[in-house]
Amino acid sequence: MAQLFPPRADIVVRTVLVVVAAFIAFVPLAVWAFARTPAATGQYHAERQPIPFAHTLHVNGLRIDCRYCHAGAERAPMAGLPPTSACVPCHVDGLLRTTLFAPVRESLSTGTPIRWRRVTRLPDFVFFNHAVHVRNGIECSTCHGRVQRMQEVYQAAPLTMEWCVECHRAPERRLRLTDADTPDWTRADVAASARLAAQYDVARLTSCTTCHR
């Protein structure tokens, strides 16, 4: 009786099985790896704003406290943005009449807030409370990077669940000394970290409901 399959059939079948197995193993790994790249997390991504606001000038040059614009950082879940009227008193009339400030003039005349573009964004299913972190020794730059040194603000951290949980497992490593006179808070040493952890009653919150409510 003649053979139903040619001699090379075994080789073809084995090759196909190996390729399928490799594909099944490769796809999840590829998705896992891509999900941690800046292309997926948005890390280093910057948004073009309606006004090129210079944090380097306002924070470093003029010594304006971050909480002047982001007043909710210490008392609310959202850090917030200032009303347009808060931007006007610091600038001379000649500057306010320039093309650069056209969106400011339009906002004041129409009562419509300036459409600032969000740079750092978390998914809607993630709950994050700025006040809880800021009031308990976590510096803004831990998540946002050194904004006062950025010519154009970008997302400094990956903000993945893995990145957040790593901090929650050992929050004392992220505590900063908050009594500094400059925006560049200093990281606490080991002894100071232990003291601050006790002072703030820091807890290692790693349950799912901490962020997913």
Image (cartoon, helix red, strand yellow):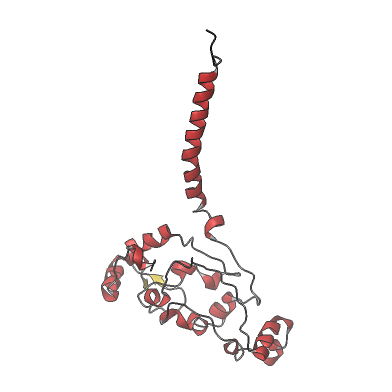
Q: Identify the image quadrant of residue 110.
A: bottom right
Number of numbered discs visible in the structure rendering: 0
Residue 105 location, x and y as percent?
Answer: 68, 87
Quadrant assignment, res 102: bottom right
Q: Residue 195's image quarter? A: bottom left
Looking at this rendering, what residue extends furthest in the front direction?
1
Query: Going 60% across and 92% down the picture, which residue do you hit?
Result: 89
Q: Residue furthest top?
A: 1
Residue 43: percent from left, percent from top? 53, 61
Where residue 184 appears, as percent x and y from the top left, is 46, 73
Quarter occupied by the C terminus: bottom left
Q: Is residue 207 above or below residue 90?
A: above
Would you say residue 173 is visible in this rendering? no
Q: Residue at x 60, y 69 (%)?
A: 152
Q: Is residue 87 visible to the viewer in this orientation of the structure?
A: yes
Q: As drawn, is 65 to the left or to the right of 110? A: left
Rendered location of residue 103, percent (x, y): 68, 82
In this view, the residue in front, 82 or 31, is: 31
